[in-house]
Amino acid sequence: MGSPDDGLLPVASAARTGRKPKVVALGGGHGLYASLSALRNVTDELTAVVTVADDGGSSGRLRRELGVLPPGDLRMALAALCGDDEWGITWSEVVQHRFRSEGDLHGHAVGNLLIVALWELLGDPVAGLDWVGRLLGARGRVLPMASVPLDIVARVELDGVISTVRGQVACALTPGRVQAISLVPENPPASQEAVRAVLDADWVVFGPGSWFTSVLPHLKVPELAEALHLTKARRLVTLNLAPQPGETDDFSPQQHLEVLRQHAPDLTVDVVLADTGVVDDLDALEKSAAALGGQVITACVAAEDGSPRHDPRRLASVLDEIFLQKR
């Protein structure tokens, strides 16, 4: 597949088929935000399954004080699904707004407080997220990957010494190379709605995002991992545009796939999508993709300003063409 013509390809061509694909996107944080910002222009049959291991900032404070799921990544996913009209843009900005003060509210995001308030009122995290989604006019659904808060534990190698670090923030910032991750509690309960969404999907999209702290944790929730293996959906991996500082320093595109295979040896993928500008060794990347059962598609999906961000319109155009061609 060639690169899209500067984002000018039709974004909603899937509508020509009369049936839009059911897509489940996995991840968290800014990577999932980028994926959802593109996918909401391709299909309205969209579900985000979001990691719940954040222990920093506003999310960490609410988690420790109230014992709730960390809401931050869930909030960002909801904001990404807002429309481009005045209503959507306004509410996206509102839920992302952070208070600035010298008091206890400093650093809290409005959306985090809104989500937690609805959780307390309704007693059901999924119902609360659905209510926020309706308020925002979200083009899709947002679900937690697990029904309890999680901690990520990383095995890290530094100068030949192996150690472990615990917590998403610590794992993301640790010196040394992360080799593998696990979750605490071990074998956590999956969100049943997330499991059903994966089993019912036409496509499951992994990434982009922080590989060890946003993408791979989904494969460590047993019932969700089983669904990801058993689903009849096609699986697509969107590779990052740059290594994650402190987490995947010096990782090549193919190393991301090799780590994915190490954490889920029996998982197969159909497509690996990589930006043309970050692939230095296409043969090596194709070999790693083939080991997972997939093919590599390269295209220009990066932002025009040269920053390591996916351009939503370019990414949407490419994903739309992939979904059409591989129906």
Image: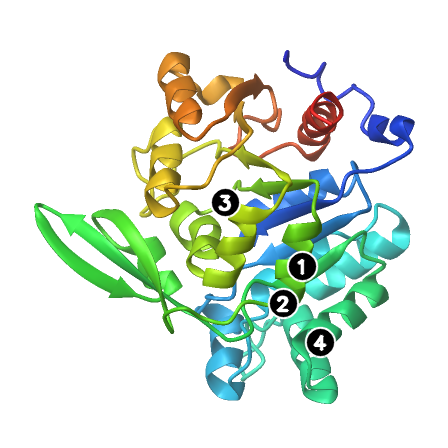
Question: Mark 1 sits on what residue?
Answer: 196
For the residues bearing labels 1 and 2, Cβ distance under 8 angstroms? yes
Contact? badges 4 and 2 (CB < 8 Å) = no
Residues under labels 1 and 4: Cα distance? 26 Å
* Among the two numbered marks 1 and 4 on one chain, the one whose residue lies closer to the N terminus: 4
Classify residue 194 by image quadrant: bottom right
- Circle 4 residues within 10 Å: few <14, some 14–19, many ≥20: some
61 vs 14: above or below = below
The mark closer to the camera, 4 or 2, is 2
Q: Which residue is mark 2?
A: 192
Q: Nearer the viewer, mark 3 or mark 4?
A: 3
The residue tagged with tag 1: helix, strand or loop? Answer: helix
Asked whether, in this view, residue 94 is left or right of residue 296, the answer is right
Query: Foreground: 191 or 282?
Result: 191
Pointer 1 local density, CA inside 10 Å: few below 14, some 14–19, many at least 20: few
Quick one: 155 or 76, which is closer to the camera? 155
* Quadrant assignment, res 203: top right
Q: CA distance from mark 3 to mark 4?
A: 25 Å
Badge 2 amino acid: Gln
Residue receiving disc 4? 114
Q: Amino acid at mark 3?
A: Gly
**Residue pictured at 44% horizontal, 25% vertical:** 289
Q: Specify few, some or many for label 2: CA neighbours under 10 Å numbering under 14, 14-19, or 20 or more.
A: some
> Could you say where residue 127 lies in the image, as x and y percent from the top left?
74, 75
Of circles 2 and 3, which is in front?
2
> Considering only vertical position in the picture, is 14 above or below 264?
above
